[in-house]
Image (cartoon, rainbow, N blue to C red):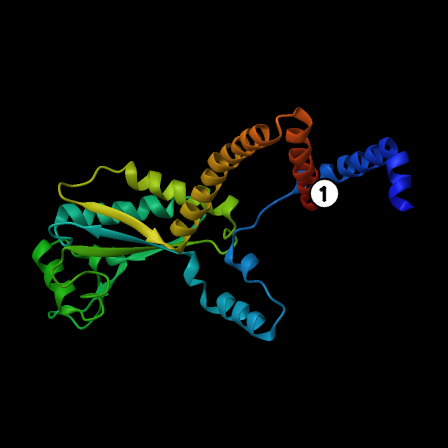
Amino acid sequence: MILDALLRHRRAVLAAVLGVAAGLGTGLAFLRFDFSPQAVFESDTPGFRDLEILYERLGRQDSTMVLLVEAPDVASDEVFAWLQEAVEDLRAVEGVEAVEGLPGAAAVLRESPVPRPLRTIQDEDLRRRAILDSPLIRGRLASEDLRAALLFVRIEAGRMDYASLAPVVDAVEAALAGRPRPPGLVARLSGVPVVRVTLVRRMLHDQAVFLPALTLLLVVVLGLVFRTRQAVLLPLFSVFLAEVLLFGA
């Protein structure tokens, strides 16, 4: 009975469905995807709230990028100067909260019990000895053979969503690429922010490539099977209408 009524007034029913879809379709303009871990793992459980309080007090580990610098000798004047200049460049990037690493570390020299920042040591041999004699620097901020050093770039806590995080990662990479490097120096940027931005970009790229390709493949298959225009357009229209109703609502 209901089916007969729908069939008798199919144009009115179709118009009503299209009207509802058009109304809900306006919500697509406000559709946003949040790829931050907070949004993915957000929960109302006490454990999640305690974890957020802990992050607020101690800082987030997932907001730190790690810059690995490899060179024949990271304690040499040329490489250490590059490290210092890189720290200043990265601190000037909008969205970067702090930059820490080997140039900002302090070491205790044999000549003085007072810790002395490495950046204030001008003698190359003395700097090299200070790094090797400090157990808090050797093997942590600099490798024991002095062929690698680390810089930590901490991003502001309010930039964890992809739209805010991606420009910061791009600016950091641009700042590193724009500074001339001494011979043999290699800099590699890693960390959770870099991985997150890379994964989201590759996912969006895959969607832009495969969705049109799959749609075209579906049209070809429907055309070969049914060989009528209506049989091709009706399934596509049904899928499109369902997506509008789902995401628009």
Residue 118 place in picture, x, y as percent: 20, 59
Viewer-proximal residue, 228 or 95? Answer: 228
Residue 81 place in picture, x, y as percent: 20, 47
> Which residue is pictured at 29% across the width and 38% down the height?
177
Viewer-proximal residue, 21 or 68? Answer: 21
Viewer-proximal residue, 206 or 42? Answer: 206
Is 2 displayed left or right of 218 in the figure? right
Residue 239 visible in this rendered orientation of the protein:
yes
Residue 121 place in picture, x, y as percent: 16, 57
Which residue lies under the disc numbered 1? 245
Is 207 displayed left or right of 226 in the figure? left
Residue 11 place in picture, x, y as percent: 85, 31
Is 229 displayed left or right of 148 in the figure? right
Residue 94 visible in this rendered orientation of the protein:
no
Viewer-proximal residue, 192 or 78? Answer: 192
Is 126 displayed left or right of 166 in the figure? left
> Which residue is pictured at 11% across the width and 50% down the height?
72
Amino acid under label 1?
Leu
> Which residue is pictured at 54% across the width and 62% down the height?
41
Label count reads 1
In the rendered image, which quarter is residue 39 located in?
bottom right
Residue 217 sits above or below residue 170 on the image: above
Question: Dot 1, crowdedness within 10 Å: few (<14), some or many (≥20)?
Answer: some
> Furthest-left residue in view?
125
